[in-house]
């Protein structure tokens, strides 16, 4: 079965930064009992001590706001409600995150996901990526994710300002992601975090020939062609 056909990923192009509209209060799913969630969460933490029950932004919906923009309606939610979905406890949680299409010269930054992550284990993806903890400054979260996943800081003027170019709806990973493009003037060395087994810089031909790519990578690949002025 082709999972991409069953759960197609969707790219929404952006011509200006998205607007995050925060709803007061906290999102608590009603599809399962809190006791079931707590039991499953404790089992996950026993298997992987890196789990941390922080705050994520639950996407309640999106709406076009004209001129190539989109409003993303979000509400705070506990991370555990998202994490337990990997064990079959469907809570209807779809958090908002950020993803990057990072360019170094004529090459693009990708990473092979480790077996310790929740989705797309062992598959290649564009780097970085991660969840938002607040609606205050998604660009700052994007910069933080780049440092955490690669060890490379975005220092001006050697990098361009990250620009939001698309919104990714990924029902397979159960996430929404703001996709940013930026250019690093140079990158001497990358240090993978626990989320990736390897990081690499690939040129256009290598990107298209890459095997073992995640559905998110495949959905984002046309954006690279557009950034290169291709159709």
Image (tube, helix red, strand yellow):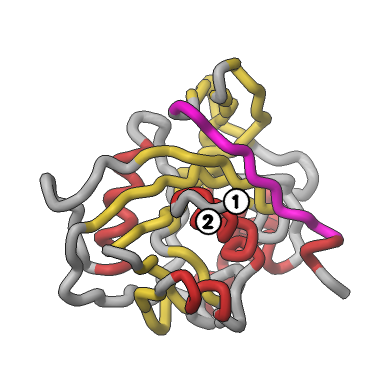
Q: Nearer the viewer, residue 64 or 207?
A: 207
Question: Is residue 13 in the magenta section?
Answer: yes
Against 2, residue 9 (above or below) is above
Q: Residue, x 56% and y 24% (percent of image)?
A: 68
> Start and end of the magenta stretch?
6-16
- SS at badge 1: loop
Q: Residue, x 19% and y 58% (percent of image)?
A: 185
What is the quadrant of the N terminus in the image?
bottom right
Q: Are marks 1 and 2 in contact (CB under 8 Å)?
A: yes
Across and down, in percent, residue 86 comes to 67, 66
Q: Nearer the viewer, residue 200 or 48?
A: 200
Q: Nearer the viewer, residue 118 or 187?
A: 187
Against 143, residue 68 (above or below) is above
In the image, taking residue 218 as reference, residue 33 lies left or right, namely right
Residue that carries the numbered disc 2 in the rendered image: 225
Across and down, in percent, residue 103 comes to 34, 59
Residue that carries the numbered disc 1 in the rendered image: 231
């Amino acid at each position: 079965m082709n999972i991409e056909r069953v759960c197609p990923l969707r790219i929404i192009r952006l011509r200006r930064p998205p607007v995050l509209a925060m709803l007061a209060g906290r999102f608590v799913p009603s599809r399962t009992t809190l006791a079931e969630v707590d039991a499953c969460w404790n089992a996950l933490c026993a298997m992987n001590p890196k789990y941390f029950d922080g705050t994520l932004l639950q996407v309640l919906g999106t709406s076009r706001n004209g001129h190539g923009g989109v409003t993303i309606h979000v509400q705070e939610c506990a991370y555990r409600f998202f994490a337990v979905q990997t064990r079959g406890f469907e809570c209807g949680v779809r958090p908002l995150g950020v993803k990057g299409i990072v360019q170094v010269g004529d090459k693009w930054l990708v990473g092979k996901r480790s077996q310790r992550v929740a989705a797309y284990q062992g598959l290649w993806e564009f780097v970085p990526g991660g969840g938002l903890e607040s609606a205050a400054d998604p660009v700052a979260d994007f910069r933080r994710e780049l440092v955490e996943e690669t060890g490379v800081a975005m220092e001006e003027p050697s990098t361009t300002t990250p620009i939001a170019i698309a919104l990714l709806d990924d029902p397979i990973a159960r996430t929404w992601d703001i996709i940013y493009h930026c250019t690093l003037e140079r990158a001497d060395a990358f240090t993978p975090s626990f989320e990736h087994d390897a990081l690499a810089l690939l040129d256009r031909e290598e990107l298209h020939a890459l095997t073992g790519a995640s559905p998110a990578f495949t959905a984002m690949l046309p954006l690279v062609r557009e950034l290169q002025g291709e159709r």
